[in-house]
Amino acid sequence: MANIAVHADSRSNNFSLSGGSKKLIPAGPSIYGMADPGHLTAVSLLNVNIALLLTKPSITSLALLQTIKIFVDRIGEAFIKTHDKNINTTK
């Protein structure tokens, strides 16, 4: 997602790393655009745990997976909340 503002892509008109300003391209590290990769990383780790814990299913493994899923949902919400907060402070 870091190259969307520079290279042609179907999303280039809808996504900006500069917090909503389509006219600016950040010249260094940026916190923008981290919500999707961060949440998808958590989802990927959930999928790995599903594959591993269901090799020998038990009540304990199912409870662990449900707990991990709750954490993944909270992680996604936290990333979106932080992303929206940072966009609103730069406008």
Image (cartoon, rainbow, N blue to C red):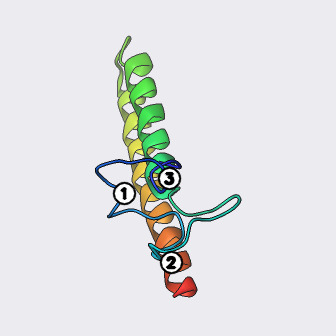
Height in image: 11 above or below 52? below
Disc with the residue nearer the chain's start (2 vs 1): 1
First in residue order: circle 1 vs circle 3: 3
Residue 57 relative to residue 64: left or right? left
Structural distance between the alpha carbons of marks 2 and 1: 17 Å
Q: Are marks 1 and 3 in contact (CB under 8 Å)?
A: no
- Hey, what amino acid is under mark 2? Ile
Q: Which residue is mark 2?
A: 87
Question: Please, which residue is most extreme toward the right here?
Answer: 28
Local SS, label 2:
helix
- The percent coordinates of residue 24 (x first, y second) are 54, 72
Q: For the residues marked 2 and 3, what is the alpha-carbon distance in whole angstroms?
A: 20 Å
Q: Name the residue rendered at 44%, 65% in the picture.
A: 80
45 versus 83 height, above or below: above
The residue that mark 1 highlights is 12
Q: Earlier in the sequence, mark 2 or mark 3?
A: 3
The nearer-to-camera label among 2 and 3 is: 3
